[in-house]
Amino acid sequence: MAAFTYKAVDKTGASTSGLIEASSPTAARQELRARALLPLSVEPTRKGGLGAVSIFRKTRSRGIGGRALTVVTRQLATLIGAGVRIEDALKTVADQASSPRVASLMLTLRADVLDGQGLAPALDAHPHVFGAFYRASVKAGETSGRLGDVMDHLADFVETRSKNQQTVQLALLYPAILALVSLGVIVALLVYVVPDIVKVFTSRGAELPLLTRSLISISDFVASYGLIVLAIVIGMITLAGWLLQRPAMRLMFDRWTARAWPMRHFVLKSNATQFAGTLATLTVSRVPLSEALEASSDTIANRFIRAKAQAVGARVREGTALSKAMHQAAVFPPLLVAMVASGEAGGTLGASLTRAAADQARDLDALVAALVALVEPAVLLLMGGVVMLLVLSILLPIVNLNNLVI
């Protein structure tokens, strides 16, 4: 069976479109006629049974959104955990989908599965929808025969991640708006207001205070070269983004962020939390440790730390204890290494990893909450300081007005 997108008209001449499953385009047209619809176009969602076309290209480029991915993952986890076959679970999710893009995605995955692929290879064709962690977890679950358990843990992870992202976005929304509005007001004052006000004082022929003269220089510079500076900044950001797409440059940047003092703690903490959470999920689901380490390493965003984690997996396969290998990598928090050592000694590695992952996640959430909480007062202080300097630069000549020589 394959999925097709169609456009048709009914007996009243009203246009309709949607998705339909059939063995061929001819069978799809026959099915539409059986529904009293006149088919205008019937196109496969996959070319030749595989490559994506038309509607699905949009799905790949834009994804399906965090909320939709959360719902889909939870539905699949529930159905697969209940013993429903993968292809039937995908069909059920497609039938219940509220978005045509989600339905198209599920039917395309189902067609891949019916063609003989596993769920993990089918997901690999859509990296813009399913991230590396998602695909690696499903692959490990299929390989170990514990897909239901892995999907259940994966659904919890996706839900938690979506909730945290929404919390951070909402927390940063007000400071971002405040910063933009304040910046716009400051630029408007420098370009349009300050020059006219300062002319009143300079016309008296006296020397203005240093702060006022500095403000006039900044105002002249913004008025003359502001757009050029803005274009240069945008160009530098674009160039930096292009360079970071090069593997060698990205590795150098990731190594720097993992070692530089201002970002080291946060980068190591966030990546260790990701690694520990994935490893705990797969270990509790009875995925072999070597496969769990490989899948967990693939989910680490920082390429420098990812290479270190992959080296940990290689040492474990050679017979080194996991805690010792993690200690030698020197990129994991000591508490996490100690918890792993405790679990290895007591034969409860899965439970220890789960507790360690939960502790790391709580620490990371507290760190993120503290950083987010500091953003708003920092923006207020910064913008307030700039406005204070603007006001002082205008008030100082007024205070000294009686001393100005005509």
Image: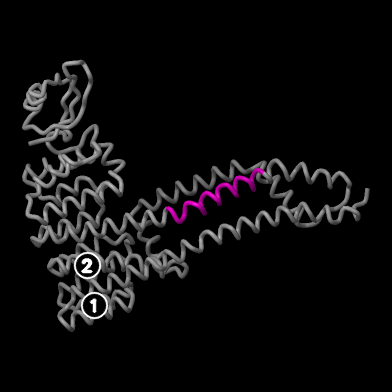
Sequence-first disc among 1 and 2 = 2
Q: Quadrant of residue 211?
A: bottom right
Q: Residue at x 17, y 32 (%)?
A: 19
Residue 136, image x, y percentages:
20, 57
Q: Is residue 170 above or below residue 313?
A: above
Q: Which residues are magenta?
A: 170-188
Say whether residue 372 is left or right of residue 46.
Answer: right
Q: Quadrant of residue 138?
A: bottom left
**Amino acid type, mark 1:** Val
Q: Residue furthest front?
A: 12
Q: Residue at x 60, y 49 (%)?
A: 182
Query: How many numbered markers are drawn?
Result: 2
> CA–CA distance between discs 1 and 2?
11 Å
Residue to which mark 1 is pinned? 340
Q: Secondary structure at mark 1?
A: helix
**Amino acid type, mark 2:** Leu
Say whether residue 151 is left or right of residue 180.
Answer: left
Inspect the magenta stretch and tell me whether residue 50 lies in it. Answer: no
Q: Residue at x 86, y 44 (%)?
A: 203
Residue 245, image x, y percentages:
36, 51
Residue to which mark 2 is pinned? 279
Residue closer to the observer: 158 or 296: 158
